[in-house]
Amino acid sequence: MDAELTTAAAEAKAALRDVAPEPGSPKPDPVLVVDGVRRSFGGVTAVDVDHVEVQRGSITALIGPNGAGKTTFFNLLTGFDKPDLGTWHFDGRTMRGVPAHVASRLGMVRTFQLTKSLTKMSVIENMKLGATSQVGEHWWKGLFPFLWRDQERKIEARADELLARFKLDHMRNEYAGTLSGGQRKLLEMSRALMTEPRLVMLDEPMAGVNPALKQSLNTHIKGLRDQGMTVLFVEHDMDMVHDISDWVIVMAEGRVIAEGSPDQIATNPAVIDAYLGAHQGKTMLEEL
Amino acid sequence: MNWGNIAEASFSAFFGVNAMYFAIAAIGLNVQFGYAGLLNFGQAGFMASGAYGLGMTAHYFQISFWWGIAAGMGYAIVLGLLMGVPTLRLRADYLAIVTIAVAEVIRLVVRSVRFKHFFGGSDGINNFSGPYRDLNPYLESGRYPFSPLDADGPTAALIVVLFVALAIGSGVVVQRTVLARRFPTLSKWVGIGVVAVVAFGLLMLVSRSVEYTGYSLWTITVGWALVAVLALFVWALMRSPWGRVLKAIREDEDAVRSVGKSVYSYKMQALVIGGVIATFAGMMFSIERGSVQPDNYSRDVTFFVLTALVLGGAAKVSGSIVGPMLFWGILAFADVFLHQLLASRGGRLELLGLEIIGSESQIGQFQLMLVGVLLILLMVFRPQGMFGNRKEMALDGR
């Protein structure tokens, strides 16, 4: 196993080796630092995170039972929802009050649990939409193709490259609505990559994806780390979490209840409690 | 029954002033509703701001009407911003509510007795089309045939170009809608060719008896030229990356946000651009009559324009032009047809012993009912409109 590790993976593992496996533990080089973020809906506190850091260049999994507040936490961090309290920094920049589209431009891009592929546009158009700083996206400059044609060509070449990497190139000119659920997940992920992000936040990338595709998706996500990106993902598929993540953050009832390497998490009694209540499920989780 | 008259009336309406100014309004609405998915129910308000901008500038300042055009466009920009700022961050329905309300507020304010000295109340502002009349190269009261066989050289050539374009256009539509499904083995080009030749022949035949006055012809020329320019403008916008963002917003705003585009800003741009285009509709309509009257910009206009756009096919530039032509063509056809039918039946129309139309005054309502039935049939059999994309329509959201 170790022989297969790429340098980026080895570096991430090494950097996290000495980090204490406890909620809110500091990381050597955090790209994302969250402090006291709270969000309640009516009387229910959906998210109440005291402190969390995400190591740069790592793949970090965010797990937890249904209703733990993982997606809400994602929404807060990316500007799709506003917290009642709290601050967070991305790459040293404070992100509180930053609208979603600005967060994305700053390099913090997310995907959605319910895939948002634009079904009535072709796959390639979906991809091209992802590219940032397009000259032709100003309305009056858009009127004059000579101002944006060159850039469009470059964007298209980059999109084609990504489509080939995600094995969607044969669907290039089809409507995105004709893609299967799993293909849509791939399309959404590659569209997010068109923005050239530094932090990729994937909300359940494996939901509804068939096992064969899961393997290749795993490889793709590891590939992102090799290219220097940080990945934070929400997932229920424990095999995947164990397979690809360098670090795992566990949420339950809005709070971070545990952190650690995948192996440490698998044996953490607090996690087992959160998932199954009491200690009954111990044997099941040990299979991880 | 005089079919010549019926054909002639429908034909005139097809190219007439009403179809023209509706087409301009529909091109604007298409930017908002068709491409960006904004439910603007206040297009009449934008049209009124164009008309009043032009009329009042001409009336009060006695300056060139080019300034009036600039003023009208300026009002539309302000109006778009006013309506957009509070609503575009909210769900789509709020824009619909606000636009319909604002359009009504505008109409009620300009027609109010309180401001009669300023806006002219329900009489509006009159007699300001002098400079426009002066530009008319045709004899104002002259009669001009609209047939390549009777018109002068250059005019005849223009009409032939128009007819050929129309014939090919109808060929494409008929091929796609009917022939492709009924006769799938038939070559595409044969289908289009046969229909185009038949359509061209019909146009030549019907146009023999059509005449426009010099003044109408001037308005038709200016108006349809404007339609062409604006259609080209919108077409150019929509093939650009800007148009791509707009179409993406129509489908899923959050997806667009997640890749770093300011959805709010794009929606605002679409609302304002569509509104500014609509001002030209108001301007053309008012300058042709040399008068602005508030009741020409009521809710009906907004909904008729919307109907015409859906008829033609939303999110298609061709749809926004042909829709209004069909809308007015069908209305005129129904009007003359029903009048003749009624006259031939002695003023009463019965179906299976049931009175359908009792007097001539009921024809107006019946006309609109026919359009409604047509629209229902269209929604059932061709929900994407005449020019819309069926494949796109069939793809369900998520």
Image: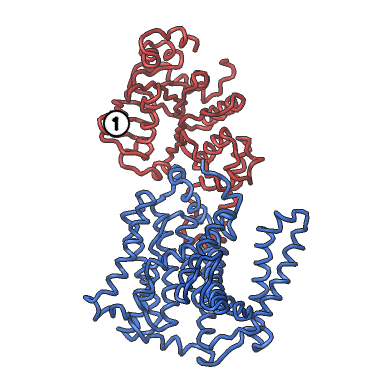
Q: Is residue A167 left or right of residue A221?
A: right
Q: Which amino acid, by three-letter code, is at mark 1? A: Val
Residue B264: image x %, image y %?
38, 52
Total marks shown come to: 1
Q: Give the crowd class for mark 1: few <14, some 14-19, many >=20 residues within 10 Å.
A: many
Q: Is residue A104 left or right of residue B212?
A: left
Above or below residue A267? Residue A15 is below
Q: Which chain is red?
A: A
Q: Is residue B157 left or right of residue B375?
A: right
**Nearest the camera: B325 or B139?**
B325
- Colour setting: by chain
Residue at mark 1: A37
Q: Secondary structure at mark 1?
A: strand
Q: Colour of chain B?
A: blue
Q: Is residue A25 visible?
A: no
Q: Is residue A12 left or right of residue A74?
A: right
In this view, which residue lies farthest toward the front? B353
Q: Quadrant of residue A45?
A: top left
Residue B159: image x %, image y %?
64, 80
Above or below residue A221? Residue A152 is below
